[in-house]
Amino acid sequence: MKKLLAVIVAVAMSASASAENTAIVGGKVFTQTNQGILESATVLIKDGKIERITEGNTVPDGYTKVDATGKVVTPGLVGALTSLGLVEVSSWAGLVDASVETTPISSTGAAMDVSYAINPDSTLIGVSRLEGVTSAATTMESTEQLFHGLGAVISLNDNTDILKSKAFMVVNVGGDGAEETGGSRAALWVTLEQVLSEVTSVKNIPGPGSEWHGLTTRADLAALKGVVAGDIPLFMQADRAADIRQIIAFKKRHPSINIVLLHGVEAWRVADELAANDIPVIIDPQLNLPGNFEQLGATLANAGRLEAAGVTIAIGMETHNIRLATQHAGNAVANGLSHEAGIASLTSGPAKILGLEKQVGTLAPGKRADVVIWSGDPLEVTEVAEQVYINGKAIDMTSRQTKLRERYQTLQMQGGSMPSHYIRK
Amino acid sequence: MKHTHSRLTLAFACLFSVMVAGCGDNSADKQAQDAKVEIDSNPYPSTYKPISGEATVITNVTILDGVGKRIDNGMVYFADGKIAAVGETVEYPEGTQVIDGQGKWVTPGIIDNHSHLGVYPSPSVGSTSDGNEMVKPVTPGVWAEHSVWAQDSGFGRALAGGVTALQILPGSGNLIGGRSVVLKNVPNRTMQDMKFPDAPYGMKMACGENPKRVYGDKGGPMTRMGNVRGYRQAWADAQDYLRQWERYDKEYADGKNPKAPKRDLDLETLAGVLKGDILVHMHCYRADEMTTMIDLMQEFDYKIASFHHAVEAYKIADKLKENNICAALWADWWGFKLEAYDGIRENIPLVHTAGACAIVHSDDELGIQRLNQEAAKAWSDGKRAGMNIPMEDAWTWLSANPAKSLGIFDKTGSLETGKNADLVLWNGNPFSTYTKAERVYIDGGLAYSLDDKMSWPVSDFELGQVGEGDAK
């Protein structure tokens, strides 16, 4: 029992060991700003913010010095598209807040708002953050309607603070999207245009006393106002080149709407037009199979070709394993993306796409001090986040998964002399 | 019970007996016998023909031989489809093609023992979805090979990832899902053109959530205990079936003229397992369920070759070792269902460290393209947790161990003299994200070359479509 107590005390102490002001010294720093990549620099963190980044290893008084010599320092990774905080176990294990059944509040799916559903105690948060993911876009996977509701951007800190609610909205204009709206793109696009014209034509949302016969509900109208004004980016999901061209045409018809292409398996075929129309892309660069008739042009070269055309890209579409975005980006680099763009696709790229560039995604004075010290190149599968800081605080680098590993590693070493349930290293 | 003769032999035997003995009773002390009923165990034989290759030696190369040896600056020589010599320096005849492997690595070809390529092919649509015969919980009589669409573009992509052989399994909706087939990964017109010569058949079984979810509302099983009842009844039926055939064989051998039992395709596969001809591959996530399955296997005296997905293998690695059962694992998948909730990144190294047989598998048309990276992740995660497994041992997860689980290790899975020349030349350290398979040899034939676009397989489905022959 005494031994157990000692273990508990040790754990408690390590959890509280975080300094307010930190200097990360000597690492190769990817600032993701005009400062570029600094081979050996000092990152000063004060009061939860990046104070400044200086070349060399001079540390002013009052900072806890952390040696990162030989290591790599980057901004915390920004998950480009996840359902973090909305799902614990995806299949058949209780409610999943990332999907919704038909409800009278919304006829188009626009009004759903994930901000109300986020659970800071989700084990996915702990598992993801200790591998370098410090913030993430989170949204519904399915509403079986036109729109996937209002997504949010969350911090993966202890409270899972919402950095931005009503941050973006997803609409699928590919085949799957058409399935939910009439079973044909011929119906889907007309519906979309009708909905938007309805939103623009209604100056004031009708109250309960007045009649309303729109395609949308009153709640949908309110949500879509922000989209039409360009305040809430519209993530338009499509894979085939024909659908992406429709998105570009849509952008020309609605220049005020802030459009992002989502998924974009054949985006490379339309890369120049995407660049010319300033449409960034969120992709999974590993999709290289003709999964359906919308993905015939799938290739691992997608990301590199988009970069060559000048398109801003973000990589990181996953939930349980958003931590693997680094591997996805690494494989894109192995297939033509520059390493620089690979790091950007995980940090400054998604931050910009999500409209969070003033807070996260770069190491610049005044930004949230979301910082990762990596054992080496973050895009190498054999390298790892050694220490993660969120809001300037060194996070406890443990999760339910590391505890399970410790328990059973101990069991293995003890030769099973103690029943597993009693082992709490 | 011998199941070796073809139907042709059977027909001929009857004809022969008609001519000679008239198939009638012409013996006073012995009952006349009908032709013995024998069942062809290989009615859909392999028609695989290797790509012809020239004798080749790779020099100055880092070698992982797949069975625990690493040679820096070594040589691999192969000819006539076989590995001829591996070492620091090897002898080879004049006229041998020499490839300078400076800065490169050679390994045995990767073997994925859990794939659904062909049965869940790309395009992945309802009309091609042929992997799960979910009409009743026990369907050992279905054979995955009869669903395999050889035009699945996934084969070619897997080849570019260094995969030289793979097991195609039926899905996991059923308690007993059917037979698997092992393929050589040389994409061709038909499944039989790819079929691995003389590889034993496998049989897929599944624990836990899937069967109970699929059948809970359709007559059961609806619980894990219902699942186990289902397996046990199936094995009991198979024992009875086996006894019927044994009785028939004995009575026939005694000169009687017994009526042969009616063939039952489901029980025939199960009987094949009980006789040791067919290997069991069992989809099972949870430690407690795997332990129950080990008891089940002992109760009915058969062998489980491998547990697949085994997300909790690390909890019972000692029991896997004791029972000589491999665990085929992902590096990091977790949480998509409750039985995958306890996934940890050190599963593979913990199983390895306990002395059990660990395998990296994909179950995925994308994952199969980079199994070397999956092994690399597990290897480095293990290292950080204090398990210092040399890379040359870690490679056993990708070739030797899966080959053992499939019963083909006598033919492939390592760079040992006499084995099939199934090997990969990597353009760098295969445990790096940035490394690619530069040349993939299967039976000594060059099946894929990174630098030669014409060597990239293009399926019929891709021909004449957007992206034909593009970098993939």
Image: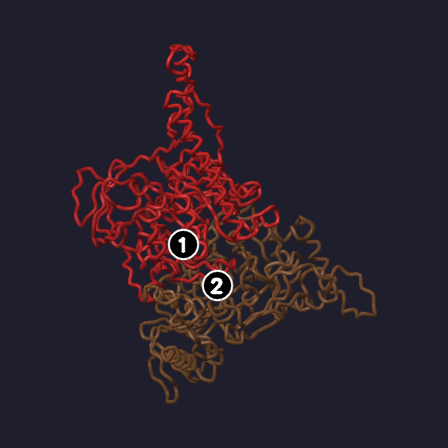
Which label lies toward us, 2 or 1? 1
What's the residue type where badge 2 is placed?
Ile
Tag 1, which chain?
B
Instruction: Examine the image and state in which quarter residue B244 appears.
Output: top left
User: How many neighbours does mark 1 have within 10 angstroms: few (below 14), some (14-19), or many (20 or more)?
Assistant: many
Q: Nearer the viewer, residue B172 or A44?
A: B172
The residue that mark 2 highlights is A322
**Callout 2–callout 1 Cβ contact below 8 Å:** no
Tint applied to chain A in the drawing: brown
Residue A144 drawn at (x, y percent)? 65, 56
Q: Residue at x 49, y 41 (%)?
A: B234
Which colour denotes chain B?
red
Q: Secondary structure at mark 1?
A: strand
Judge from the rendering whether residue A162 lies leftward or rightward of residue A346; answer left or right: right
Q: Amino acid at mark 1?
A: Leu
Q: Nearer the viewer, residue B196 or B215?
A: B215
Going 49% across and 28% down the picture, which residue do you hit? B262
Residue B155 seen anywhere in this rendered image of the structure: yes
The quarter in which the N terminus of chain B is drawn is top left
The chain carrying label 2 is A
Q: What separation in Å lies between label 2 and label 1 (alpha carbons)?
A: 19 Å
* Residue B259 drawn above or below residue B57: above
Residue carrying label 1? B329
Residue B71 x/y as whole percent = 21, 53
